[in-house]
């Protein structure tokens, strides 16, 4: 065991503990305050160090809080001066859902690369909370040089590595902030992947009069005819005219409407008030005009008949 990970914060006395720092993930595809599709796991060196220093971790979704006893300040400051076993903590970033890579817009990684974020970097993403990008990609060899990780710990490659240096003068300053009630908050931000949403609406003919509508009038959908896969029902197909972010658990936004032949524009009836959002899987990749795009297919399991 590498210290403790407490889910119920109420079991820890706030008067007796001091927060050293928060490490959290933010993903726009998830609701604030919940899990963001990943978690942080300490390296072997970090686990041993935290156990020796009696550091406590409190986990809430994708947020990790590291605490220590109120009287540990001097002990930690002494350890921060140690050059043999520096007060430097490494955490692996790991996805807790197989679909994380589907709905997350990550820079394309080459073999032997991973995301690397550190509080020692100038313009650090961890401080600003800016989403990770190509500038956050580092070779595994470089990660090994900058941390006390072993190569075997990086196989299979984690999604990323977060390195927090609390040694020397920088560490002393960070510890002083923490013990005066101003702990650092490190944020690993992500961007949602965008895809063209393609609705398949079961219908009883050619799909005449059907339309997919955005009540906010921000997105339009084009009717792309009907398809009839072998042995399956007939579907009217509608595709968004721009890529949309994949959202986890967000309420349905788009509506299915029908206008009878000859009816005025105000004579539309709403058949489905909230069409389902695009799923995270499957996600289809396509190359159009030399550009790499993604398409999400959304099959609506309702017959549209007797309109």
Image: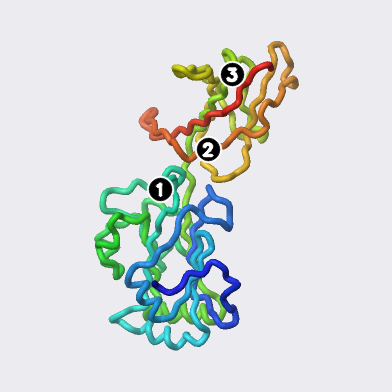
> Tags 2 and 1 in contact by the CB under 8 Å rule?
no
Which image quarter: residue 265? top right
* Alpha carbon separation for disc pair 2 and 1: 16 Å
* Alpha carbon separation for disc pair 3 and 1: 37 Å
* Pick the front one: 36 or 108: 36
Residue at (45% x, 32% y) in the render: 295
* Pick the front one: 34 or 1: 1
What percent of the width, then of the height, locates residue 151?
A: 25, 62
Residue at (33% x, 78% y) in the render: 86
* Pick the front one: 123 or 265: 265
Crowding near the residue tagged with mark 3, few <14, some 14–19, many ≥20 C-alpha atoms within 10 Å: some
Crowding near the residue tagged with mark 1, few <14, some 14–19, many ≥20 C-alpha atoms within 10 Å: some
Q: Is residue 232 left or right of residue 15?
A: left
Disc 1 on helix, strand or loop?
loop
Q: Return the disc, 3 or 2, that comes first in the chain's sequence.
A: 3
Q: Which mark is residue 21?
A: none
Disc 3 on helix, strand or loop?
loop
Q: Is residue 244 left or right of residue 164?
A: right
Which image quarter: residue 268? top right
Q: Which mark is residue 244?
A: 2
52 w.r.t. 188: above or below: below
What percent of the width, then of the height, locates residue 157?
A: 31, 55
Residue at (74% x, 20% y) in the render: 267
Residue 57 appearing in the image: yes
Q: Return the disc, 2 or 1, that comes first in the chain's sequence.
A: 1
Which image quarter: residue 9? bottom right
183 w.r.t. 289: above or below: below
Kindly identify which residue carries mark 3: 203
Residue 22 appearing in the image: no
């Amino acid at each position: 065991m590498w210290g403790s990970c407490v889910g119920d914060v109420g079991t820890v006395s706030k008067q007796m503990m001091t927060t050293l720092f928060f490490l959290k993930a933010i993903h726009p595809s998830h609701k604030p305050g919940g899990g963001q599709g990943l978690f942080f796991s300490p390296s072997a060196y970090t686990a041993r160090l935290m156990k020796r220093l009696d550091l406590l971790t409190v986990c809430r979704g994708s947020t990790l809080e590291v605490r220590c006893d109120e009287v540990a300040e001097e002990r930690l400051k002494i350890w921060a001066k140690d050059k043999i076993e520096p007060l430097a903590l490494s955490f692996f970033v790991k996805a807790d859902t197989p679909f994380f890579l589907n709905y997350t817009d990550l820079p394309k990684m080459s073999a032997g690369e991973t995301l690397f974020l550190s509080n020692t970097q100038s313009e650090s993403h961890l401080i600003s909370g800016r989403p990770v990008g190509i500038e956050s990609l580092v070779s595994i060899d470089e990660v090994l040089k900058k941390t006390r990780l072993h190569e075997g710990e990086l196989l299979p490659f984690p999604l990323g590595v977060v390195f927090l240096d609390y040694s020397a003068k920088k560490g002393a300053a960070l510890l002083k902030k923490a013990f005066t009630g101003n702990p650092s908050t490190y944020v690993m931000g992500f961007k949602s992947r965008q895809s063209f949403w393609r609705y398949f609406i079961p219908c009883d003919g050619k799909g005449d009069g059907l339309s997919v509508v955005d009540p906010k009038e921000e997105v339009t959908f084009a009717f792309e005819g009907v398809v009839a896969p072998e042995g399956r029902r007939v579907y009217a197909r509608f595709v968004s005219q721009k890529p949309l972010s994949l959202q986890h658990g967000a309420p349905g936004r788009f509506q299915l409407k029908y206008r009878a032949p000859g009816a005025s524009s105000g004579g539309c009836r709403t058949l489905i008030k909230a069409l389902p959002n695009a799923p995270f899987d499957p996600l289809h990749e396509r190359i159009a005009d030399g550009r790499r795009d993604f398409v999400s297919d959304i099959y609506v399991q309702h017959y549209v008949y007797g309109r």
